[in-house]
Image: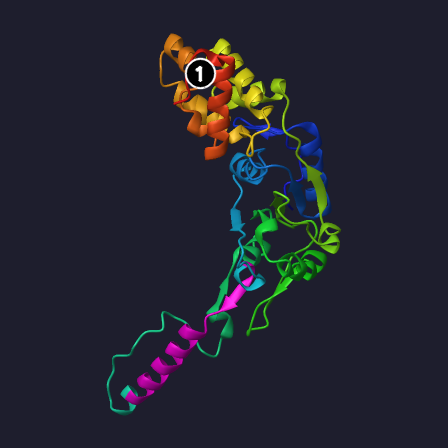
């Protein structure tokens, strides 16, 4: 039976109660959890940290502009099948000539078509009860991709190409499926109807301090307070791309390599701002504001 306990996070992952409840409902009902929200809010980390914390097998499918169900579920290796068919003919000829040595097909049998089915993360997860499946950034995929998943999500089964093998799993044994989206495009209504939905709002400062504490527990509180204050000031500047949680954690990972006094000075001077600001326009706007307002006591490096 799949892991249905109420999971509230791990040593490295803070899972707020609303997200934890949505994740629990999805696993209880044997349905995927669709998480939307801006980049860097921990959508992808949820299934990764859950699998790690519970020591569960993890399957990941990062979607892109060329994603299709064949890649996700399974494909038939026609090249390998043709090669093995040729090997069988050659072996038959060698046997007629009295040669004892045979060419190898690595144990595959052309009479058994399932030997040539290459399973993708979807079929692999459905074959492993109590596993975890992440379909990451599904909004990057062509629109037909989520539509093509409707049958599998509704009937909890995949039909393997050529061999006709059916991989089916019960509601109780469904893998914990998490699907993430940055909302680059709207997903089909019918697809959303097959999922439990949750939107991750960007964390407030108090929650951000808890997140930082999980990743950098030994970091001086005054450094964390100053860094978080600057971080939220940056997010309020109306940048084209506001810094995210992941980028704040990376910035602090760099900052903590210095002594406390030096680290505080580097935070105030925004040293290492390239971990936070990701576009040339935003960097120029930030520099202009700092020159104008004299904030943080230094220049952007």
The C terminus: image quadrant: top left
Q: Nearer the viewer, residue 234 or 168?
A: 234
The answer to whether 63 is drawn above or below residue 278 in the figure is below
Badge 1: few (under 14), some or many (20 or more) residues near its Cα, within 10 Å?
many
Q: Is residue 201 left or right of residue 56?
A: right
- Residue pointed to by mark 1: 267
Q: For residue 44, what is the image quadrant?
A: top right
Q: Residue at x 50, y 74 (%)?
A: 113
- Residue 22 falls within the magenta-colored stretch: no
Q: Magenta segment, principal secondary structure?
A: helix
The answer to whether 55 is drawn above or below residue 73 in the figure is above
Query: Where residue 243 appears, x then y in whole percent?
Result: 53, 29
Query: Where residue 71 appears, x then y in whole percent?
Result: 52, 61
Q: Nearer the viewer, residue 35 or 139?
A: 139
The residue segment tinted magenta is 72-93
Q: Nearer the viewer, residue 254 or 6?
A: 254
Does residue 217 show up?
no
Colouring mode (rainbow / by chain / secondary structure / one colour): rainbow
Q: Residue at x 57, y 19 (%)?
A: 233
């Amino acid at each position: 039976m799949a892991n249905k306990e109420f999971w509230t996070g791990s040593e490295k992952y803070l899972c707020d109660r609303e997200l934890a409840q949505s994740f629990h409902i999805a696993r209880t009902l044997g349905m995927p959890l669709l998480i939307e929200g801006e980049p860097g809010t921990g959508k992808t980390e949820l299934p990764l940290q859950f699998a790690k914390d519970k020591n569960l097998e993890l399957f990941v499918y990062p979607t892109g502009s060329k994603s299709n169900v064949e890649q996700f579920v399974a494909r038939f290796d026609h090249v390998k099948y043709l090669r093995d068919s040729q090997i069988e003919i050659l072996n038959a000829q060698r046997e007629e000539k009295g040669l004892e040595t045979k060419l190898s097909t690595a144990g595959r049998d052309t009479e058994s078509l399932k030997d040539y089915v290459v399973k993708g993360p979807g079929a692999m997860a459905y074959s492993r009860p109590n596993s975890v499946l992440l379909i990451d950034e599904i909004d990057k995929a062509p629109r037909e991709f989520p539509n093509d998943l409707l049958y599998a999500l509704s009937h909890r089964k995949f039909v393997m190409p050529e061999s006709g093998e059916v991989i089916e799993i019960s509601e109780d044994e469904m893998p914990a499926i998490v699907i993430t989206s940055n909302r680059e495009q709207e997903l089909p209504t019918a697809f959303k109807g097959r999922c439990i939905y949750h939107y991750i709002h960007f964390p407030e400062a108090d929650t951000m301090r808890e997140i930082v504490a999980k990743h950098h527990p030994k970091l001086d509180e005054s450094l964390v307070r100053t860094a978080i204050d600057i971080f939220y000031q940056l997010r309020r500047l109306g940048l084209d791309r506001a810094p995210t949680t992941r980028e704040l954690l990376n910035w602090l990972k760099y900052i903590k390599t210095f002594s406390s006094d030096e680290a505080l000075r580097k935070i105030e001077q925004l040293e290492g701002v390239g971990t936070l600001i990701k576009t040339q326009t935003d960097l120029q706007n930030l520099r202009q504001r700092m020159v104008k307002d004299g904030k943080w006591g230094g220049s952007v490096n």
